[in-house]
Image (cartoon, grey):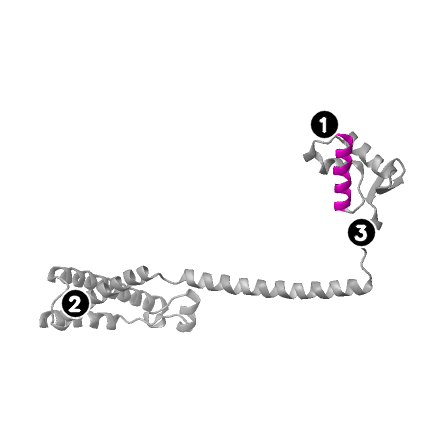
Amino acid sequence: MAPKSDSTEAIVLNFVNEQNRPLNSQNAADSLQKFNLKKAAVQKALDNLADNGKISFKEYGKQKIYIARQDQFDIPNSEELNQMKEDNAKLQEQLDEQKRAISEVEGEIKSLQSNLTLEQIRDKEAKLRKEVKQMEDKLVKLRDGVTLVRPEERKAIEEMYSEKVGHWRKRKRMFKDLWDAITENSPKDLTEFKEELGIEYDEDVGVSLQSFSELLQHGKKRGRGQ
């Protein structure tokens, strides 16, 4: 059922006063759709309110602009405006303080959330104790001279290591023979020639075949001593 004209005018008048800004009939009709008011009804209500002096209006060509009557509002004087500004500044300070307090509380909450719970601490403690016990048991075995690597595993590793060192020694010797043959009658400075070709000796990169060979011999002696 369509609203009565007087109730429509009451709705429109209340809306215009609340908005207190220039409006046309389309603005008002769009905003008052929730009351099931048609644009024609809103237009009629606006015209009636304007004719009765309850709202103000101005015409711009074919369009009418409506606004609430300003004489119904209490307009503060300069003193009241200054007081309002001071009150607003105080309220803004209080708001900033509340924001800082909220930020601090949020930071504390995040910090607490990042900490372990008592149950998590106990679980971690149990895990660490277990790891410590395992390492202590291993240390005891090492101190007692218990062999942790089976002889067949040690032998296989030593043989593979010896084979790799042998290949290294063989290739090192092959390179030396080839290099000596190439550079025997070369007029170039051998160091510059080597750098020009991008060749690096073992010593240039901080390794030594002799040290690796001695490591192998040391391992064999230790194995016989056990």
The image shows residue 108 at horizontal and vertical percentages of 47, 64
- Magenta span: helix, strand or loop, mainly? helix
How far apart are the two marked residues, 3 and 2, measured between alpha carbons?
A: 89 Å
**Residue type indicated by callout 2:** Asp
Residue on which the image places disc 1 = 2
Q: Quadrant of residue 167?
A: bottom left
- Relative side of 105 to 55, left or right: left
**Residue type indicated by callout 1:** Ala
**Residue type indicated by callout 3:** Phe
Q: Quadrant of residue 144?
A: bottom left
The image shows residue 166 at horizontal and vertical percentages of 21, 64
Residue 9 forms part of the magenta stretch: yes
**Sequence order check: which comes first, mark 3 or mark 2?**
3
- Relative side of 166 to 111, left or right: left
SS class, disc 1: loop
- Relative side of 68 to 91, left or right: right
Tag count in the figure?
A: 3
Residue on which the image places disc 2 = 137
The image shows residue 123 at horizontal and vertical percentages of 28, 60
Q: In which quarter of the image is residue 203?
A: bottom left
- Relative side of 126 to 189, left or right: left
Magenta span of residues: 2-19
User: Where is 211 relative to 43, above or below?
Assistant: below
